[in-house]
Image (cartoon, helix red, strand yellow):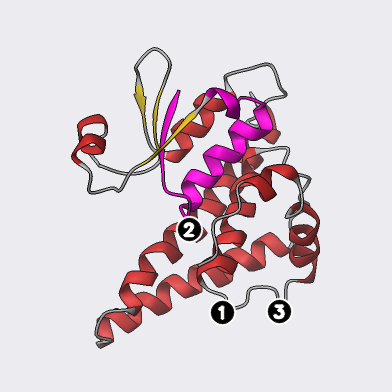
Amino acid sequence: MKLAYSPASPYVRKCWMVAILRGIDSRIELWKVPTSAPELAAQNPLSKIPTLITDDGQVLYDSPVIAEYLDSVGDAPRLIPAEGPARWKALTLAALGDGILDATQPRRREIALPQDDGRKDYIATQQAKVTRALAVLEEESLGDLTTIGEIAVACALGYLDFRYPHEPWRPGHPKLEAWYARIVTLPAMARSMPPAA
């Protein structure tokens, strides 16, 4: 398998953590490629990372699809429950984690542009999404990266630390802070840590 990646991408990190937790990371070649590269666009018309090329040549994107595929490879316990309430909880938490990323990644570009009223409103709307998501997560009972939901949330909190240290998320979220302090040292988190900004 071949994974198109950037070491700073939280979406790539989520997929890589799945591979580590499933014990299949050694089977994946990391392909560091910019999203502007023609060779990436030739594989993925959206020219996005992550993109996974499977052993049989199938091209998969985006991170939820790749994570689910990786979760189907190998013999380790599944990170996406097959059915029932546990499945819906894991997938909903994953959507919440991805939603934090979706609200924060584009905001980095917006902050660098002239700040007219429309842009200020957009930034405030995205910040409010993160604030509400953190409040919901503070009430959750989270385990030690045993589901895709916990992985996505961990990646989102890590990304907030990485790209928004000036907007600390820990104040007002002691339960979430304690959970993150516990799981950040786990091997999958430590091995997927983005480089220093």
Q: Secondary structure at mark 1?
A: loop
Disc 2 target residue: 101
Q: Secondary structure at mark 2?
A: helix
Closest to the observer, 164 or 101: 164
Residue 89 located left or right of residue 176:
left
Closest to the observer, 29 or 167: 29
Measuring from the top left, give residue 22's x and y in whole percent.
66, 27
Closest to the observer, 54 or 37: 37
**Magenta segment: does it hold 189?**
no
Residue 130's place in the image compared with 183, above or below, is below
Disc 1 target residue: 167
Residue 18 located left or right of residue 48:
right
- Specify start and end residues of the magenta stretch as a single range: 1-27
Q: Secondary structure at mark 3?
A: loop
Q: Which mark is residue 171?
A: 3
Residue neighbourhood size for the residue with mark 3, other residues' Cα within 10 Å, grouped as few (<14), some (14–19), many (≥20): few
Mark 3 residue type: Pro
